[in-house]
Image (tube, helix red, strand yellow):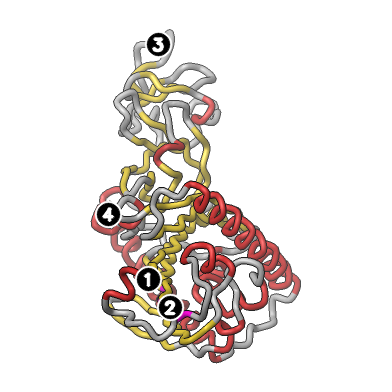
């Protein structure tokens, strides 16, 4: 559980969280200082000045450059030192590593691999975050576990029946078998629940007072974004016709997972919905429900991580509901192997 996919984009923070004051972020075990230039352009550099190894996140922005707050060395967005106080000569070694950074879908993304491999087409598709006809509730949760355990957790929602009874869990989730689909380098975990009781959260969002038909379709968008497509309509209505549009709703629970290190992961999450777009009270209720739900997950995953470290020779058992998790793990192994080959070819 120690490998990461490095030639990929990772979410750093929400767009509105980033300003001209540098911030410290750790991704894949690497420390970054992230900031906006005076022109509003997102930037990311190694959080370590080459002079006396002071954190660049303690510095400040000067126009389009970042200045070390310790001795005033100034670096441009390409990592070149542009000035040293009291010194005209600038050594060749006076450089700092930079990370390509872009802004898309109301998020700041950083490329953690080889710069010459940077490809904007590989930014994970989470277009619901700023799409017309959708509104979002957002937040973040920190987990004391390896990022793969959180991937497992989000792909297999069987646990919601037992862990999240007060918010999103119902008996039918655990009792309904999953199916898996494979398409375009994605494993899709699908669950269709007919004539079922709505969860507390679904009652609040959809105003349901009777039984419903609900669905889940979950997949991992490389390298580490889990998309949960979920929706509901009154039971026995036409899911593909007007009944879905006027009596039901669609949601996307988007989890941009940021592996901090081998045993810590940050979940930048969003709950996007296509109904009641201007209901601020509903936003508050969803926020509370999701924060509670993810806190409950965090407790279990931290315990899981500890037990894995206590019992390194124990292997996990797989149940029928783990089919999507197992197939996705194999897919991740292939992505990691491809990434390592890519890195090896770049070194030649």
Q: Which mark is residue 234?
A: 2
- Reading the chain from its start, which is encountered first: label 2 or label 1? 2
Q: CA distance from mark 3 to mark 4?
A: 35 Å
Q: Which residue is mark 4?
A: 117
Q: Is residue 5 left or right of residue 39?
A: right
Residue furthest out toward the front: 209
User: Can see residue 327?
Assistant: no
- Residue 229, magenta (yes or no): no
> What residue is rendered at 46% in x and 58% in y?
271
Give the residue displayed 33% in from the left and 80% down from the top: 239
Q: In which quadrant is the N terminus drawn? A: bottom right
Q: Earlier in the sequence, mark 4 or mark 2?
A: 4
Q: How many marks?
A: 4
x and y percentages locating residue 230 in the rendered image: 43, 71
Q: Is residue 120 visible?
A: yes
For discs 3 and 4, the disc positioned in front in the rendered view: 4
Measured Cα–Cα span from mark 3 to mark 1:
70 Å
Mark nearer the N terminus (3 vs 4): 3
User: Rounded to the nearest whole Å, what is the CA distance between mark 4 and mark 2?
Assistant: 48 Å
Which residue in the protein does label 1 denote?
247
| Numbered tag placed on residue 131 in the rendering | none
Q: Answer yes or no: do the residues labelled 2 and 1 have beta carbons within 8 Å?
A: yes
Classify 167 as above or below 243. Answer: above
């Amino acid at each position: 559980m120690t490998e990461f996919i490095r030639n990929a984009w990772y979410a750093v923070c929400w767009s509105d969280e980033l300003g001209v004051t540098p911030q410290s972020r750790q991704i894949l075990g690497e420390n970054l200082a992230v900031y906006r230039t005076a022109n509003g352009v997102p930037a990311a550099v190694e959080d370590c000045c080459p002079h006396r190894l002071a954190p660049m996140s303690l510095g400040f922005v000067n126009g389009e450059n970042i200045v070390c707050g310790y001795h005033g060395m100034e670096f441009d967005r390409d990592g070149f030192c542009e000035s040293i106080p009291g010194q005209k000569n600038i050594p060749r070694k006076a450089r700092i590593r930079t990370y390509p950074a872009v802004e898309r879908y109301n998020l700041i993304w950083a490329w953690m691999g080889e710069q010459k491999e940077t490809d904007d087409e590989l930014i994970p598709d989470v277009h619901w975050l700023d799409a017309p006809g959708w509104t979002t509730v957002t937040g973040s949760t920190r987990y004391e576990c390896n990022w793969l355990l959180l991937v497992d957790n989000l792909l297999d929602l069987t646990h919601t029946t037992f862990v999240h009874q007060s918010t999103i869990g119902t008996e039918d989730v655990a009792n309904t078998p999953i199916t898996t689909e494979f398409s375009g380098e994605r494993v899709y975990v699908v669950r269709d629940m007919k004539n079922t009781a709505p969860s507390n959260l679904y009652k609040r969002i959809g105003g349901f007072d009777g039984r419903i038909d609900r669905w889940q379709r979950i997949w991992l968008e490389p390298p580490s974004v889990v998309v949960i497509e979920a929706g509901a309509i009154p039971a026995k209505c036409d899911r593909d016709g007007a009944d879905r549009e006027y009596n039901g709703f669609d949601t996307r629970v988007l989890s941009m997972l940021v592996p901090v290190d081998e045993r810590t992961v940050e979940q930048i999450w969003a709950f996007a919905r296509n109904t009641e777009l201007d209901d601020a009270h509903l936003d508050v209720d969803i926020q509370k429900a999701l924060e509670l739900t993810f806190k409950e997950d965090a407790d279990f995953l931290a315990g899981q991580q500890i037990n894995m470290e206590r019992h390194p020779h124990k292997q996990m058992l797989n149940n029928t509901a783990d089919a999507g998790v197992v197939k996705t793990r194999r897919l991740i192994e292939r992505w990691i192997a491809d990434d390592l080959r890519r890195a090896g070819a770049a070194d030649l």
